[in-house]
Image: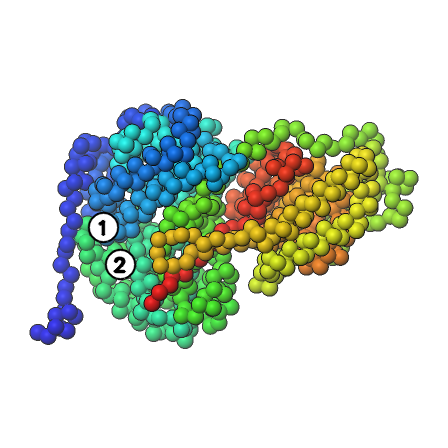
Amino acid sequence: MSVREIFTSMEYGPAPESAAEAQSWLHRHDATLQHLIAGEWTPPDSGEYFDTRNPATGEVLARVADGNAVDVDRAVNAAANALDGWVALGGHGRARYLYALARHIQKNSRLFAVLESLDNGKPIRESRDIDIPLVARHFYYHAGWAQLMVAEFPGYRQIGVVGQIIPWNFPLLMLAWKVAPALAMGNTVVLKPAEFTSSTAVLFAEMCTQIGLPAGVFNLVLGDHKAGQALTVHPRVGKLAFTGSTEVGRILRKATAGSGKKLTLELGGKSPFLVFEDSDLDSVVEGLVDAIWFNQGQVCCAGSRLLVQESIADVLHEKIRKRMAKLVVGDSLDKSVDIGALIDSSQLERVTQMVELGVSEGARKWQPQCTLPDKGCYYPPTLLTEVQPSATLAQEEIFGPVLVSMSFRTPAEAVQLANNSRYGLAASVWTENINLALDIAPQIKAGSVWINCTNVFDAAAGFGGYRESGFGREGGREGLYEYIKPLWEDQLSAGPVQALPLMDGLGVPAGVVDHEAAPQIDRTPKLYIGGKQVRPDGGYSTAAMDAAGRVIAEIPVGNRKDIRNAVEAARAAVGSATGWSGTTAHNRAQVIYYIAENLNVRGEEFVRRIMQLSGKDQADARSELELCIERIYTYAALSDKYDSRVHATPYRNVTLAMKEALGVIGIVAPEEAGLLGFISTVMPAIAMGNAVVVVPSQHYALLATDFYQVLDTSDLPGGVVNIVTGNQDVLAEVLARHYDIEGLWYWGTREGSKMVEEHAAASMKRTWVNYGKFHDWENPAQGQGEVFLRKATEIKNIWIPYGE
Ligand code: NDP
C-alpha cells in the first residue's frame, strides 16, 4: 500500500475522552443539582426536580432543582443584601476575586469541558479548545476592568442586582459573558441557566464558594421558564440580561416595559456568509465548517445563509459537498468528532421539520452518506440549494447543522440580500480584495462582521445585534456600559426643572388668533418633511399660545400619515452609502457649525419668540439662545471626535469597533424645555449621522417651526431633520409602532414611557425613555454629553485577520 493510499483510506478511530472525573463530580453531588442562594446549596421551594440528560446518549445525568418565584425571591434578596459589601470592596478587591475565578476555571478546565460536553452534546474538541478558554479569558479581562473602573468610568456607578437568563447552546460561555462584566462593575447577580444545561453553572457556583466569593454576590437559581419569568418581573432586579430566542426576548421587553429596568437582549440571527468570486475557496470551505457545523449549528451567529457569487456557485457547492462527506458525526466525548448531538429531541424534531418545510418550498437537499449513532439526538450536516430569498429557510433561524445557499451577481446585490433579514447579528465576508471587503462591511446591518474568518469571539470585543437580533453589547468596553449607570440619572427630578409658563388665558378656543400678540407679519407654521414645508395630511391645526395663554398662531396637527411620510424622508436621507450616515464626520461637523451660525444670525428673532412663549425676560431668553448655540457647537465638535477604536483581541488581526449611526431615530422632545430641549435632543442624533423625525414640545412648537428656516439655510440635506408637530403621546405611539425606525427617544410621562417600550418590542427598536422624570437641560451633566452619543450609535466589530 502506498503512503497516498494509506492517507486516503484512513478511517477515524474513536478517541474517547474519559468522563470519570465529571461522573465522580456528579456523584459527589448525589447527581442532584441545587440552587446556590446566599452561598448555600438550597433545595427548591417546590421540592420538585426534573431530569437532565446527556443528548449524545439519552442517559439521565442528574436531577435539577425546579425553581419557582419563591426561590427567585430568596436569591434576589440575597443578592441585594450582598450588594453594599461588594461595592465597598472597591475595584481592586473585586478584581482579586475575578482573577481568582479565572485561575480556578483554568485549573479545572478539563472537568468543565467534559461536563459541558456531557450536558450539552457538543464535541469535546470545541468545549475544550473554544468554550472554556474563552470563559477563563472573560474573567481575566474583566478582572482588569474591575481594577480600572474608577479611573475609566468616572461619574458612573453599579446598577445593583442583575438578573441574567441564558440559553443552552454555550452554557458556561454565556454565563461568563454575563457574570464577569456584571461583577466587575460592582453588581451582584442572580443567574438562571437553561433547563437543559445546568451542570457547568453549578460547577461554577461551587468554584465561587471555593474561592471565598462573598455569599450572595453570585446566586444561581435552576429551573425552567417559570424561574425566568419570576426573575424578569422581580422589583428588586435593576437590570436584566437575556440571551435566547427573539420570541422570548420580545416577551421580556414587554414584561419590563415602564419598570425602569435596564435590559439587554442577545437574540437570534440568520447571519449571511458572503463569498465573492475572488475568494480562496478552500479557506471558504473551512470557514463554512466553523460557521455552520460548529456546535451543530446551534449558534446564534451561525453563518447559516451562504450567499455566493453566481460565477463560482457550482464550484463552491461541489467543494462543500466533498468536505461535508468527511465530517464525522458522533458522541460528544469522542475527540475526533466534528459534529455532536443536538441539545434535545425537541430540537431535533424542530430542525427535521424545518428542513422538510424547506424542501416542500422548493429547496434541494443534500446530505452526505454518514453513519449516525443509534441513540441520541443527531442530525446530519445538510446543504440546501435553490433556495429563494423569500423562502422560510432563508428567513427563519433553523438552529441546526443546516446550510442554506443562494447566489448573487454584483456586490450591491450581495449587500441587499445580506440585509434582507429581520435579524442583524453577524456576517462573514470572503474576498481576497481588502478594498471590497472594507466597502461591504459597513453596509451590512450586523453587530459583528468577520472578514475572511468567522465565529471569532473575544472578551475585548463587543458582541450583539442590530434589528431583531436584540440590543446591547457583551464584551469590550462597550459591554460595560450595560452594567453601569451615570450618576446624574439619580439626580433626575420628579417635577419639571424648566417649568412651563402658568397660562392665565387658558381656555381661548383654537382659531381665535390674538393679532395684538401675534408677530407683525404672520407666518403659517407647517410640518417640515424631506426638507420641505408641508401641510398636515389631516388638515387640522391647534392653537399655539403665548406665555399668558393668548392664542398667537395655529400649529399643524400631524397624524399617522405625516409620520409615515417623515420616516420615508428620513430613511431616504440615510439609506444610501452617500447619504447623511455615509458622509464624512468632517462634513457633518461643517453643516452643524453652519446651523449654529445661522441660528446666531437670527438670534434676536428667537430671543423674542422664547420670551413670547416662555415668559422669560430678555436676559434669560438670550441666555437660553446662547446655550443652544453653544450646545450645537459641542455636537459639531463631537461629530468627528466621538470616534471608533481598535480592540486588542489576542489574535493576528485588527478588530475595529466602529461606531455607526442607528439610522432613523424618532424623538419626542421634552415638553417643558423649549428650544433648548429641541436642540439638546436633535443635535447629538444628527451629529452621529442619524436622520430624525422629531415631535417637538407642543407648547413650544413655534420655536421648532421657526427653526426649520434655520435648517433650510444651513446646507442640511432634506430629510435629515423632519418635524411633525401635534399631540406628543399620539405621535409617540405611531413612532413606537413603526417598523422602519431604529431608535425612539421619548421625554414624556411615565405611562408614555411604558407605552413606548411595550410597542417597541415588535420591531425591537432601541428606546430611550425618561419614565416621567425630568432632566435639567441647562445642566451640561444632564443635558448633553457622551450618553446622548452612545444612544445615537451602535458598535459594529469588524474583524480583519492579517498575515499569510
Ligand atoms: P428560549 O429563548 O426559550 O430560552 C432561553 C432562556 O430563557 C432559557 O433559560 C429559558 O428557560 C428562558 N425562558 C424561556 N421562556 C422564558 C420566559 N417567558 N421568561 C423568562 N425566561 C424564559 O430558547 P429555547 O431554549 O427554547 O430555544 C428555542 C429557539 O431559540 C432555538 O431553536 C433557537 O432558534 C433560539 N435560540 C437562540 C439562542 C441565541 O443564542 N440567540 C440561544 C438558544 C436558543 P428554559 O430553557 O429553562 O425554558
Q: Nearer the viewer, mark 1 or mark 2?
A: 1
Residue type at mark 2: give it: Pro
The residue that label 2 is drawn on is 380
Q: Residues within 10 Å of mark 1 (few under 14, many from 20)?
A: many
The residue under the point 79% across, 34% down is 616
Q: Residues within 10 Å of mark 2 (few under 14, many from 20)?
A: many
The residue under the point 33% across, 27% down is 214
Q: Is residue 526 visible?
A: no
Q: Which mark is residue 124?
A: 1
In percent of width and height, residue 667 lies at 64, 45
Q: Quadrant of the N terminus?
A: bottom left
The residue under the point 41% across, 46% down is 475
Q: Is mark 1 within 8 Å of ligand 1?
A: no
Up-down relation of residue 119 to residue 718 (above or below): above
Q: Earlier in the sequence, mark 1 or mark 2?
A: 1
The foreground one among 585 and 289 is 585
The residue under the point 40% across, 48% down is 460
